[in-house]
Image (cartoon, rainbow, N blue to C red):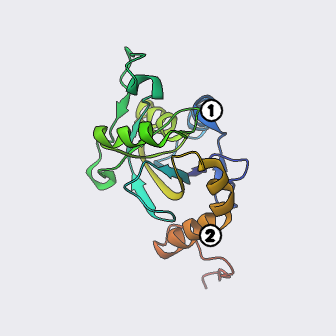
Amino acid sequence: MIVCAGQSETFPFATTIGVGLIESAMNLTRLCLFDKPDYILFIGSAGSYGNHNLFDIVESSNASNLELSFLDNNSYTPIDNVLRCDDPKFQSETIVNSSNYITTNETLGNEYLQYGIGIENMEFFSVVRVAQEFDIDVKGIFVVTNYTNKDAHKDFISNHSDSMDKLVKHLENKKMIVPRGTTLKKSE
């Protein structure tokens, strides 16, 4: 099952699950309850904390939920805030941080790198957590649209269209989706 957030990130071959941690968790849970998939592939955009360049494609099965207040020692959490996929065929080193907020403070954004966190995407932590709950293999494929700095939103808007095209081409090249414009022939 291929899923995406929605709003400005919809694809004809993916099911929309909603934007942010809450909508994505609720809607993906509903999908898994009614028609449990063998695997979940989440696709979407991401902001880079500095180690990934604009338009890079990043694949990951690891997610975190470290809020900016944690970096300033202004909060703690009793829950497991870093999730890793156990299936070796879906392993990767990059951890994707998720929050309902986009990081615009470059100094704090760079601190995520000290925790091994490379990019941020609003939904992926929820996606991984729901997949774990239902014992489903999970992977995310992201395209970097912006850096986590004061221009994050402006750069996201300006790079979004080209980024989505790059993401689709990547999925086509990996044969995860049928290339656009391809006509499928019936078997004889």
Of the pair 53 and 134, the residue shown nearer to us: 53
Secondary structure beneath label 2: helix
**Residue wearing tag 2:** 165
Which comes before the other along the chain, label 1 or label 2?
Answer: 1
Q: Please identify the quarter of the rendering in which residue 156 is found.
A: bottom right
> Picture coordinates of residue 139 (x, y %)?
43, 50
Q: Is residue 164 above or below residue 29?
A: below
Residue ranking furthest to the right = 7
Q: Please identify the quarter of the rendering in which residue 65 is found.
A: top left
Amino acid found under the numbered disc labelled 1: Arg
Of the pair 122 and 31, the residue shown nearer to us: 122
Q: Is residue 150 above or below residue 43?
A: above
Residue at figure coordinates x 72%, y 52% from the top left: 8
> Picture coordinates of residue 37 (x, y %)?
51, 45
Residue at figure coordinates x 37%, y 39% from the top left: 112
**Residue 96 visible (yes or no):** yes
The CA distance from mark 1 to mark 2 is: 29 Å
Residue at figure coordinates x 60%, y 77% from the top left: 179
Looking at the image, do the residues carrying marks 1 and 2 touch, with CB atoms under 8 Å apart? no
**Residue wearing tag 1:** 30
Of the pair 113 and 130, the residue shown nearer to us: 113
Amino acid found under the numbered disc labelled 2: Asp
Q: Residues within 10 Å of mark 2 (few under 14, many from 20)?
A: few
> Picture coordinates of residue 124 (x, y %)?
50, 41
Residue ranking furthest to the bottom = 188
Quadrant of the image for the C terminus? bottom right
